[in-house]
Amino acid sequence: MRRIRLIIEYDGINYVGWQTQPNGVAIQEKIEQAILHITGQHVALHGSGRTDSGVHARAQVAHFDTDARMDAGKFAVALNTRLPSDIRILFSEECASDFHARFSAKEKQYRYTLQIGEHARVETRNTALHLHSAPDFAKMQRAAQSIIGTHDFAAFMAAGSKVENTTRSIYASEWTQIDNYWYYNVRGSGFLYNMVRILVGTMLDIGRGYLPENAMETALATRNRNNAGATAPAHGLCLMRVVYDSEE
Amino acid sequence: MRRIRLIIEYDGINYVGWQTQPNGVAIQEKIEQAILHITGQHVALHGSGRTDSGVHARAQVAHFDTDARMDAGKFAVALNTRLPSDIRILFSEECASDFHARFSAKEKQYRYTLQIGEHARVETRNTALHLHSAPDFAKMQRAAQSIIGTHDFAAFMAAGSKVENTTRSIYASEWTQIDNYWYYNVRGSGFLYNMVRILVGTMLDIGRGYLPENAMETALATRNRNNAGATAPAHGLCLMRVVYDSEE
């Protein structure tokens, strides 16, 4: 039995999310079906974490165990022949048998994209949140920087989530601007359910003057979801990278 | 009666092309329906030229005549509320009554995109032709430059096309490279049916060594379609700009 690690790119628009659900097609499920087709084996594919319906990934990481004798590096090409064009295996390799895509992850990087302008551009309609007018960039930048460090992010977790330890470390949190696109890049030890989308929603409310400039600090201090802003739409979010010890 | 000019962006993947056809939904038709909805009038929308099924546009130009009293600049926003997200009106304005999107056009600019790499990237799966390995860039660049000027492009026209004058002027024709993406940018007085795709297909055949380095010149000189290469797939092509006198 060998453990195979996959690096996966996908467009989340047409899926119910990473994780198999009763109400639609999931990315995990599509890849498990492709593995079944290639190897004849039903396997459980373990991702680094779920992504919601509509959320994209540039480099999701997942692993599975198999008896198949195929060269580990060949899985990427073989699986791609069985996958739709909105899911691509970018890389495959054998990994240590104690590697776990979720539990071995040390850091995750996400990006959220805004497109500012009168009309939602066709090219980025599924990958950027369109805003008719620009929020206050400087206010959003200050808000982004206020969360760097180790904090209790309970206020930035979707209601109903049952995680007990809501403390996370944020290593980088910054907005950049290229023409009419604004990118929020955030790196951290891990993220609670909907955390990046609630962070972005709160910063947008600060940038548009709906919330005071210190709303991020208030939400952190009070641990109260009601002091944070709305959950930003899923389609602007992309999982960019998952970092493991071996890569450090 | 006023004449309104539109600048239009679209993703051609889900359409039979610009022009209304019996066998599927066309972009022209979707916009005419939106105009009907907004103004109550059946209008004929005239584009700067057809684009094939799968071909995209960053800035197609079209015009129509209307009695509607709406502020000309407001058509863009109003039509977008009635259009699917893969078609966007970027700009609308009143134009001279003798302006014609097709006959007044002085220059067109197209771009063809290649993505080089082991796997077809998800983000550009509908907008770039994926190649597993890189052709010879220098050979393709020399071939691109050999067509600059005024020539008879009969060899670079789809069989069955009935245009009589096949002479066109090419003002710029160049490949550029950004990471693993190669872009062919071409500007000219006008283009024959499938001309850009046959130019690209011929350059690809030169770059992969299937055709001699002087194949472009041979095709031009002989006016024989058989001396040019294959027609490159539609989805890599994008109409970038149409230039009119007033903009010069």
Image (cartoon, coloured by chain):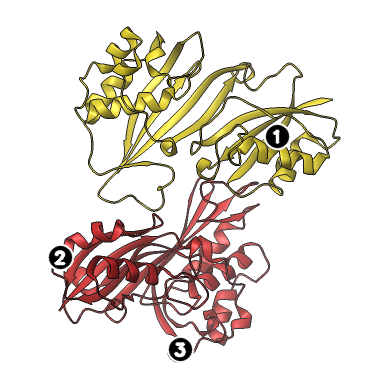
Chain colours: A red, B yellow
* Left or right placement of residue A214 versus residue A111 in this view: right
- Residue B165 visible in image: yes
Residue named by callout 2: A70
Q: Chain of mark 2?
A: A
Q: Residue at x 13, y 63 (%)?
A: A71
Residue under circle 3?
A: A163
Image point (29%, 51%), residue name: B119
The tag on residue B227 is none
Callout 2 crowding tier (Cα within 10 Å): few <14, some 14–19, many ≥20: few
| Residue type, mark 3 in image | Val
Distance between the Cα atoms at labels 3 and 2? 39 Å
Q: Residue A30 at x, y = what percent? A: 38, 67
Spatial separation of the CA atoms under disc 1 and disc 3: 51 Å
Q: Secondary structure at mark 2?
A: loop
Name the chain under label 1: B
Residue drawn 40% across the image and 28% down it:
B197
Question: Residue A51: where, in percent of width, then height?
Answer: 44, 71
Q: Amino acid at mark 1?
A: Ser
- Which quadrant, please, contains the C terminus of chain B? top right
Give the image quarter of residue B226: top left
Q: Callout 1: few (<14), some (14-19), or many (20+) C-alpha neighbours within 10 Å?
A: many
Please state the horizontal and vertical placement of residue A113, each as a whole percent of the image.
50, 57
- Look at label 2 and name its amino acid: Met
Q: Is residue B118 left or right of residue A136?
A: left
Number of marks: 3
Q: Residue furthest bottom?
A: A164
- Whether residues under marks 1 and 3 lie with C-beta atoms below 8 angstroms apart, the answer is no
Q: With respect to residue A151, does B203 lie above or below? A: above
